Image: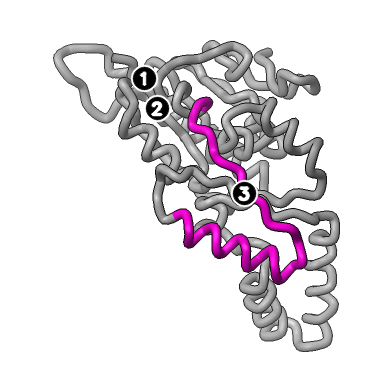
Amino acid sequence: MLKLKVIACDVMRREVSWLASQSPCYVDVSFLSQGLHTTPEKLQLFLKEEIEKANQGLPYSHFNESTFYDYIILIYGLCDNSIVKLSSSRSPLVVPRAHDCITLLLGSKERYRTLFDSSPGTYWYSRGWIECSLQPGEERYTKTLKEYTEKYGEDNADYLMEMEQGWFNSYKHAFFIDWEDLGNSEYYRSYTKKCAEYLKWTYREEKGNTGLMERLLSGIFNEDEVLVVEPGMSIAASYDETIIKAC
């Protein structure tokens, strides 16, 4: 049985936990806060620490078998180069060929590219994103305005809100990615619809696809889907359709 250490963003908690429970491998998962994405350098540091910790081995041993993980899997995309330069000293790293977690939720980088090209100006909603951070919508606007007003006064708050809302203008669509097997879809669907209505965006729903992550957590590593980084090598951006490379 393969022993896999999985390090994942908290945004993927439901999906990863569900797939890990069904894996034929031993899967040990650690989740990191979604908030670390706001500072890529900080996220990189936390990932490095988790990798180093994983290389020390499992916290227990069984039947005199190896106490080290066969692979360390990062459930992260390139994510503003947060994973660039990461390396492992003992167990190989396995990393999906993805710019961000949307590829993982949709099942392939090819599907993500097709949807990206056909529907420019799309903002993606998922269970994890809705749970882990305030998404564009009325709730975010109201809470952010209250926070700014209390900290900086009403006039400054209005200016800051204008800046805060400015980047929303580049979006036109709210896409909810539904992994229906996880249940409770209607709550997240309704939330996304309300956000779309408030922002005057069109609502659309895309079915999630478990394929890519299911293979990852089952120890199936297809070269066109994932990069296996041997000990001593590090992750680099490839700036082409493969997204990442080892160097």
- Residue 82 x, y percent position in the rendering: 66, 36
The first of marks 3 and 1 along the sequence is 1
**What type is the residue that disc 2 sits on?**
Lys
Q: Which mark is residue 5?
A: 2
Q: Which residue is mark 3?
A: 205
Queried whether the magenta region covers residue 131, the answer comes back as: no
Q: Which residue is mark 1?
A: 69
Specify the quadrant that holds the N terminus: top left
> With respect to residue 141, does 121 lie above or below?
above
The first of marks 2 and 3 along the sequence is 2
Q: Which quadrant of the structure image shows residue 62?
A: top left
Gap in angstroms between the C-alphas marked 2 and 1: 6 Å
Q: Is 111 left or right of 72, judged from the image as shown? A: right
> With respect to residue 143, does 122 lie above or below?
above
- Residue 30 x, y percent position in the rendering: 41, 39
Gap in angstroms between the C-alphas marked 2 and 3: 32 Å
Gap in angstroms between the C-alphas marked 3 and 1: 38 Å
Q: In this picture, which residue range is highlighted in magenta?
A: 185-212
